Image (spheres, rainbow, N blue to C red):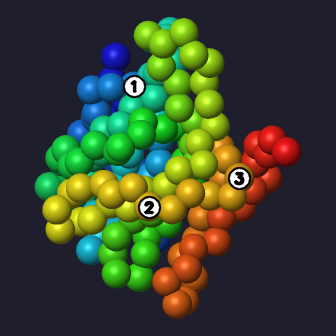
């Protein structure tokens, strides 16, 4: 089974299918990059496949309508928050880690990573104060990032 993807132009109200990814992905993180490409990372296999988070990253080039592989997240995650930083890097924070081959239950993450478009590599960065899944993130002036915490899991 593959994941069907479409690219749309809201000005002319047209959607067209584009190259599919081979892996079904539930709740991946997708952001538009400054150069017009898009980055998709993480997500999870569906329930029928046993729910495991992905660490793979793909970059979509709209001129060729093709996906190419990029680096792997240090921690596989689904439903993570993401923001494109002022320098073009991408910050991914939080999310849900799950592994169908592990006896451990899924866990909500408080970790974050930064993707460098020049190298395609992910680097671990600071921890969030609270674990969160399904949050939103936005880059602010001055290089900071604001994340929502409506789904934060706090153990105190």
Q: Is residue 132 above or below residue 100?
A: below
Q: Which residue is mark 2?
A: 125
Q: Earlier in the sequence, mark 2 or mark 3?
A: 2
Front tag of 1 and 3: 3
Q: Quadrant of the N terminus?
A: top left
Q: Which residue is mark 1?
A: 24
Q: Position of residue 45 (x, y in %)?
A: 45, 22
Q: Which residue is mark 3?
A: 130
Q: Is residue 24 above or below residue 49?
A: below
Number of residues whose C-alpha sits closer than 10 Å to that of mark 1, classed few (under 14), some (14–19) or many (20 or more): some
Query: Helix, strand, or loop for circle 2?
Result: strand
Decide which of 33, 89 is in the foreground and name it.
89
Q: Earlier in the sequence, mark 2 or mark 1?
A: 1
Q: Is residue 75 above or below residue 94?
A: above
Q: Quadrant of the C terminus?
A: top right
108 left or right, relative to 46: right
Identify which residue is drawn at 28% across, 43% down: 72
């Amino acid at each position: 089974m593959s994941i069907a993807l479409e690219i749309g132009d809201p000005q002319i109200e047209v959607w067209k299918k584009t190259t599919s990814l081979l892996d079904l992905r539930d709740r991946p993180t997708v952001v538009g990059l400054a150069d017009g490409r898009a980055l998709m990372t993480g997500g999870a296999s569906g329930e029928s496949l046993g729910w495991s988070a992905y660490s793979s990253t793909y970059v979509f080039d709209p001129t060729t309508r093709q996906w190419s592989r990029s680096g792997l997240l240090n921690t596989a995650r689904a439903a993570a928050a993401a923001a494109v930083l002022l320098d073009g890097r991408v910050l991914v924070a939080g999310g849900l880690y799950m592994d169908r081959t592990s006896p451990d239950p899924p866990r909500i993450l408080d970790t974050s990573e930064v993707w460098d478009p020049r190298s395609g590599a992910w680097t671990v960065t600071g921890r969030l104060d609270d674990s969160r899944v399904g949050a939103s993130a936005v880059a602010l002036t001055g290089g900071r990032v604001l994340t929502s915490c409506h789904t934060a899991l706090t153990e105190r």
